Image (cartoon, grey):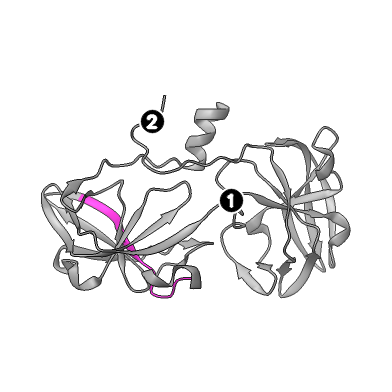
């Protein structure tokens, strides 16, 4: 039976899926390129997005050393390794696939994203995690009116919007700033990044009658080229506000984090 609280397409890639990466992948530590490959693999440890698995032979600097710790990731067993580059050691930087993992992964290492300083697809830096080849992000102009409320208080009322459709996430409605009631919003220091949209330039919260609604709205002043139509506009979390599109209230979606997905499908704490 379909979950009626979800009104957007779900994620379809199964855990353990392995696919070739048709892009040149490079990564750096301390400004030095430590891997450079055209033979990377996508490996899905959860449906949201993949990780890169890199042929160990394609390390250009440094050395992987076994930490003596065995584990199991989504696709199969692996052993944890640290990466030494000159005098610098990145503890637990990678998992090298062990016997019992899919044959295509043997001889490759799945690096922790944050263990390396910068990642590149071709000549463009990629942030947060690899982009999934099965994720679409479309920013479309819309003549639909959008009103945003919390407890009956109107925070924004726009005659049109840019609707952003991202696979696996609720539709986001980006509004021109002139249609937002800034007297009711408080700026925060929060900054988030997305591999598809870029890095946020602002977050805002709302306080009323003793209730604090943190970080309910955000903006990308300088989004990626693919999401250029949302530049400078403001979106509100559908999950935390009441949204009316052409006067019709939308059901608040229930967003599922990776941790929540693990709890539901893998029984992990």
Residue 49: x %, y % from top left: 58, 49
Residue tagged 2: 3
Extreme residue toward the front, this view:
143
User: Looking at the magenta stretch, what is its main secondary structure?
Assistant: strand
What residue occupies the far right of the structure in this picture?
57
- Res. 134 mark: 1
Toward the viewer: 75 or 89? 75
**Residue 4 in picture, x, y percent from top left:** 34, 32
Q: Residue, x 18% and y 61% (percent of image)?
A: 156
Which quarter of the picture shows residue 205? Answer: bottom left
The answer to whether residue 93 shows anywhere in this view is: no
Residue 220 is covered by the magenta coloring: yes
The image shows residue 203 at horizontal and vertical percentages of: 33, 64
Marks 2 and 1: in contact by CB < 8 Å? no
Between 251 and 52, the one nearer to me in the picture: 251
Please say whether residue 159 is one of the residues in the magenta stretch: no
In the rendered structure, which segment of residues is drawn in magenta? 212-224
Classify 126 as above or below 266: below
Instruction: Please give left or right for residue 126 compared with residue 214 in the image.
Output: right
Residue 178, image x, y percentages? 19, 73
| Residue found at x 31% / y 52% | 237
Residue 180 against residue 215 in the figure, above or below: below
* Mark 2 neighbour density, 10 Å: few (under 14) some (14–19) many (20 or more): few
Q: CA distance from mark 1 to mark 2?
A: 22 Å
Q: In the rendered picture of this protein, how many numbered marks are placed on residues?
A: 2
């Amino acid at each position: 039976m379909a979950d009626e609280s979800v009104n957007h397409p779900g994620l379809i890639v199964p855990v353990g899926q392995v696919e070739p990466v048709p892009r040149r992948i490079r990564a750096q530590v301390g400004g030095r390129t430590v891997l450079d490959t055209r033979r990377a693999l996508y490996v899905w440890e959860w449906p949201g997005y993949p990780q890169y698995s890199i042929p160990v032979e394609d390390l250009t600097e440094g050395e992987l050393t076994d930490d003596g710790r065995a584990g199991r990731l989504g696709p199969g067993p692996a052993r944890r390794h640290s990466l030494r580059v000159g005098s610098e050691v990145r503890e637990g930087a990678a998992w090298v696939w062990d016997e019992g993992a899919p044959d295509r992964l043997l001889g490759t290492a799945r690096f922790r994203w944050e263990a390396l300083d910068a990642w590149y697809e071709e000549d463009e830096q990629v942030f947060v995690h690899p982009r999934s080849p099965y994720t679409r992000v479309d920013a479309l102009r819309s003549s639909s009116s959008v009103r945003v409320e919390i407890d009956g208080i109107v925070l924004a009322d726009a005659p049109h919007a840019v609707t952003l459709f991202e696979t696996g996430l609720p539709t986001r409605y980006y509004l021109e700033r002139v249609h937002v009631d800034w007297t009711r919003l408080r700026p925060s220091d929060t900054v988030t990044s997305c591999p598809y949209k870029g890095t946020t330039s602002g977050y805002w919260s709302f306080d009323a009658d003793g209730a604090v609604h943190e970080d309910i709205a955000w903006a990308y002043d300088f989004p990626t080229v693919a999401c250029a139509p949302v530049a400078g506009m403001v979106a509100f979390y559908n999950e935390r506000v009441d949204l009316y599109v052409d006067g019709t209230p939308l059901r608040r979606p229930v967003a599922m984090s990776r941790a929540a997905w693990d709890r539901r499908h893998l029984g992990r704490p």
